[in-house]
Image: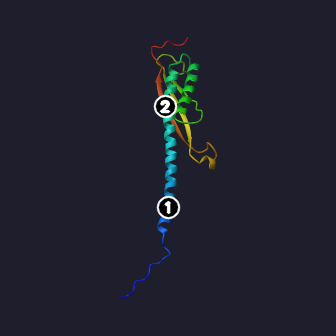
Amino acid sequence: MPTPRPRPHGDAGNAMVEFVYLSLLLMIPLFYALLAVFQIQGAAFAVTEASRQAGRAFARADTPDEGYARAAKAVDLALKDQGVAGSVVPAFTCDPSPCDLSSGQRVEVRVSYTVSLPFVGSFFGKGRVGIPVTGTHVEYVDRFKQSPP
């Protein structure tokens, strides 16, 4: 009967090192992707709510200038509520044009924001690389509202 050969001793503990290496290699990109998706989703919620609140604030104002001021404040509050930093100016489209807050007028509000990807700004420069998100809301001026003088 042949004698069994002794096991090689140089491979002891390599499985643990390979497991840790592969785990880190796979977990870091997954963690980065989740971080980016959560930031984009938070910004999407923020611009959606900001456009909704800006439309309501504008349509219920007495004058267009007051409406623009109220809408800008509503956008800032809605974005800060979701933890989105930066100032965004809403864009208004009225039908019939111009935006004079006449009764029954259709007001469409668009709020756009660019989400900076985490850690990418340090490589390419702040604000150069990002994902744009946009929120749109349509509001109607109350049809029983008196037209401004």
Measure the alpha-carbon separation of dots 1 and 2. 43 Å
In the picture, the disc for residue 100 is none
Q: Secondary structure at mark 2?
A: helix
Counting from the top left corner in percent of width and height, residue 41 is at 48, 40
Q: Amino acid at mark 2?
A: Glu
Q: Which mark sits nearer the N-terminus, 1 or 2?
A: 1
- Please tell me in which quadrant of the rendered image residue 99 appears: top right
In the image, farthest residue toward the left: 1
The residue sitting at 58% across, 23% down in the picture is 69
Query: Could you tell me the amino acid type at mark 1?
Result: Val
- Figure quadrant of the N terminus: bottom left
Residue found farthest to the right: 125
Which mark is drawn over residue 49?
A: 2
Q: Secondary structure at mark 1?
A: helix
Crowd tier of the residue under label 1, counting other residues whose Cα lies within 10 Å: few below 14, some 14–19, many 20 or above: few
Left or right of residue 120: residue 12: left
128 in relation to 66, above or below: below
The answer to which image quadrant residue 116 occupies is top right
Please state which of residues 61 and 64 is positioned toward the viewer in this rendering: 61
Give the percent coordinates (x, y) of residue 145: 48, 14
Asked if residue 96 shows in the view, the reply is no
Q: The C terminus appears in which quarter of the rendering?
A: top right
Residue depth check, mark 1 versus mark 2: number of the one nearer the observer: 1
Return the residue nearer the eye: 40 or 107.
40
Q: Position of residue 122 (x, y in %)?
A: 63, 48
Residue beneath the point at 47% across and 63% down: 19
Residue 20's disc number = 1
Within-10-Å neighbours for mark 2: few <14, some 14–19, many 20+: many
Colouring chosen for the image of the structure:
rainbow
* Depth check, front residue: 97 or 109: 109
